[in-house]
Image (cartoon, helix red, strand yellow):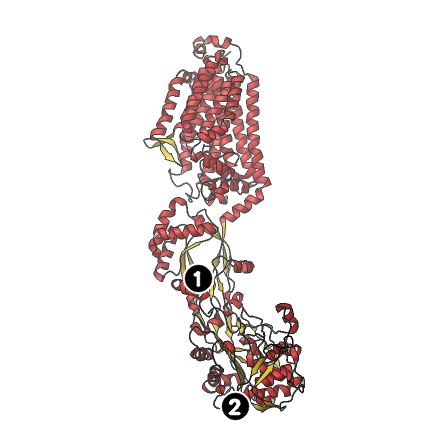
Amino acid sequence: MATTTRRWRSPRPGRREQPAPAAGRGGFLALRALALLLMAILVGQLVRLQLVEGERFRQMAASNALREIQVPVSRGLIYDRGGRPLVYNRASFDAAIVPAEVRPEQQQRLFQELGSIVGLSPLEIEARFREARARQSPYDPVVVKEGLTREQALALKEREPDLPGVRLLERTVRDYVGGPALAHVLGYTGPISAEELEALGGLGYHLHDWVGKAGVEATYETILRGTPGRVLLEVDAFGRPRRVVAQQPGQDGSSLLLTVDLDLQRRLYEALSAQVPPGEVAAAALMDVRTGEVLALVSLPSFDPNLFADPARRDQAAALLDAPGKPLLNHALGELYPPLDTFKPIVAAAALQEGLVRPDTVIRNLAGYMLVSNPLAPGAVPDIIFDPRPLGDMDLTRALAQGANTYFAQLAGGSPDGTLRGLGEGRLASYARAFGLGEATGIDLSGEAPGLVPDARWKERTLRDPWRPTDTYRFGLGQSYLSVTPMQVLVATAALANGGRLLRPHLVQEVRDPDGRVVAEAGGEGRASLPISPANLSAVRQAMARAVSEGVARAAAVRGLQVAGVTAAGEGGHAWFAGFAPADQPLVAVVVYMAHGSADRAATVASQVLDFIFNQSGIAQGLREGRR
Amino acid sequence: MIQERLARHFDPVLAAGAIALAGYGSLLIYSASLSSYPDGITGLGHPVVKQALLALLGIVLMVLLMMADYRAFGRVAPVLYGLGLLLLVAVLLVGDESLGSRRWLSVGPLQVQASELAKPFTILALARYMADRPLDMRRLRHFLTTLAMGLVPAVLVMLEPDMGTAIIFGSVWLVMALMGGARPYYVGLLVAVLVLSIPLVSAAALSDYQRERLALFFNPNLDPLGGGFNILQAEIGIGSGGLLGKGLFQGTQTQLDFLQTATTDYIFSVLGEELGLVGALLLLALYLVVIFRCLRAASLSYDLFGRLLATGIAVMLLVQVFVNVGVNVRLLPVTGIPLPLISQGGSSLLMTFMALGLVQSVLLRRRPFEP
């Protein structure tokens, strides 16, 4: 026993005689307390993270691991009134990188491989990557190459699983059939802007979506788009999908059946283009006077809407923004011009309705000019109103047909001898407004200008200048601050033609869901009725018919068709034709505007398209039969 | 005789606690490696298999050391200490670098983490030095000597750089010096000087890598996809675990690879996410049991060397757990040290088992004479 004990003895037996070490029981107590304290600190933090803030972290973990992706649906198509497609869908592929899914050490290899697939140098990709990385969230894909070729897209699709963070984005691109002829009707699509994203945010739009930017593409954006499908994926830290958590099928966009006739639209585009030099501003439109259906609408200069979808031609598209003549602006409704003589039918209708004249009321000895002095400055040079030539005695009908400015100036401001009391600016303005001037027509296109109907109060308030007699005379001639869009003139002319109904012009007659069912239909709803008796309207129509048959608008005449209308030409080159046909049983109204043209050129365009409608195609026949 | 002592003094709670921790660790490693080994255990290459085999080896070594007389290690302590320093220097010269730090020495097919060996060697040396001078420890000379003994390996690991292990060396020395009889006045003075020099040190001595880690600790959003990624993802993982966790193998942060080094430095986040606060409390309770049993062994020993040795090991475990978990729960800046007995990695696992074997040996021989 002793040896064993000895063996286990301390090597220095004397040691155990030593007093207890300096820190004895107290030291161990303190150490135990320290261990408990440190553990308590950890537990405290755990309670804070897991219980107090647990909900927040649970959400962060969920948003880490869940990713919603959109399944694209096909955008609704657009057809002309005869059911001919005006746009086709085509798939386009972009190569993109999601920065959050790329580990820094893999970046170079990724740029290299992606570059070799899509035909870019790694440096170019890196530059694009860095530039986009600085301004957007790392979870949003950075598009490094747009519009991949089919081969590139296939190669990328194949390699996608081996290239974490790289995405092949599929997008629908529109091919517009009519090219520039239909540009302002159809519009075009483009990448969503920050403002649009905010406005449409509630509808599930995303950063890289394309939306309608103009034309019916923009107006009917939400209808055409449909509802993209959604797939909720669980993804790992590298963005690789692990499983589908939830799925919601999408719905293709609905299609639009337009009121526009493709052939007529092309004819109008050609006819108008032939009458104005390239790059000049002009606009023309045709409308069914019974329903407000717009049969054709052209604005010049035009552009090719297919430019915007082509990455190679993006520079050309950008150049359109400040090209001369503002091609992107729809001049038929986005810009204001003086209506000039196209306002005269309205003055005539107003004077008849107010009982100032009858159609056969004659004003004698129209000398070809008229002096209007300024009562505020009696000594100043008077304003002179000219007629085309000395016209002698004229009644209302002949005055309208022959373009007698002095006659209409007197209807507006009264005759110098006081025998004829004029309408005055107040009544002129209220009739102008009754015909829809000074307010948007409500057409289903964006960017419409409301225009301006002046009166004394407006002039004093806005220009700080009193209303003068000459302002009233000029008002009667469609000048002096009165400014309108061609579309407003068209609607006013149609109202004269259809017996007094002011219509809301529209381009879409039906919305059809992907199964072809009609889900919405445009009613031919009127906005208002003109405060003009049918007899007075009829008198004005006859006068307009005379203008074409034997007056100033003879250039609008069409063989075998009674056309009614007025032409206008004024300082600065503004030229108009506004009219309808047939004169006795109006079907179609037409307006032609040229910023630098002549009355005859404008009337010629109208003549050509009316000829096309009534003589060369079945369009008039179709309209009469209510066929589309 | 040894059987008699075994029966009388062997601490089954300490042994059971250690083995339970190793088992708990294997479970967590299994979960954390599911995304890399989705089919579970199919061969000997699976990390859990390696870890379990190493744990078995560790238990054998623990028993062998328990049987051996710990005082024998005291006698060769200076040699072991020198070997430890040699390893730390070697690792700086020829070590393998990983994640910006040189910590491993390749010995044939094995990778040895030098600091894991240096830790117990330094504890042995400190205990031996202090136990040899029970009364003289109050003298400044000896105090400074022990300080230097702790400081040299601390500085060497800091050069790797491995801030976490340096902190362990420092705290182990601090507690052992106090328990070994150094004047609290000196210790207090030294701590005061250290605290006051923190700004100076952080300006001059911290490497860019460490400064960056500190900046990221205070604001991981500086670089949410780079260096700050782990800090944020670990916090999200633990926080989202809640009270009961998302269930074993069900943690999205773990299974979808949002957590990096999930089997090693960040294994606590796996636990926090999948087993929640309850699972974390169980782990911390197991550690408390092990640490308290080590301190019990120390306090029961009549031998100053054994006392200091067991104390040093207890403190080593305590600080290691606190630093590792503290990093996981974002109480401390990132510093990669393993969670003892839990994290994947042979050096730490074997050395921890062996250290606990030494503690059992101290316990078995706590009295010079058995009645």
The kind of residue on which mark 1 rests is Arg
The kind of residue on which mark 2 rests is Ser
- Residue B331 in percent (x, y) is at 53, 34
Crowd around label 1: few <14 · some 14–19 · many ≥20 (10 Å): some
Crowd around label 2: few <14 · some 14–19 · many ≥20 (10 Å): many
Residue, disc 2: A549
Any mark on residue A401, and which? Answer: none
B249 is higher (above) or lower (below) than A449: above
Q: Pick the quarter of the image with the N terminus of chain A.
A: top left
Q: For this view, does A499 lie left or right of residue B163?
A: right
Pick whichever, A96 or A167, lies toward us: A96
Confirm whether residue B23 shows in the render: yes
Confirm whether residue A435 shows in the render: no
Pick whichever, A346 or B204, lies toward us: A346
- Residue A184 in percent (x, y) is at 48, 71
Among the two numbered marks 1 and 2 on one chain, the one whose residue lies closer to the N terminus: 1
Residue drawn at x 53%, y 10% as measured from the top left: A19
Residue, disc 1: A171
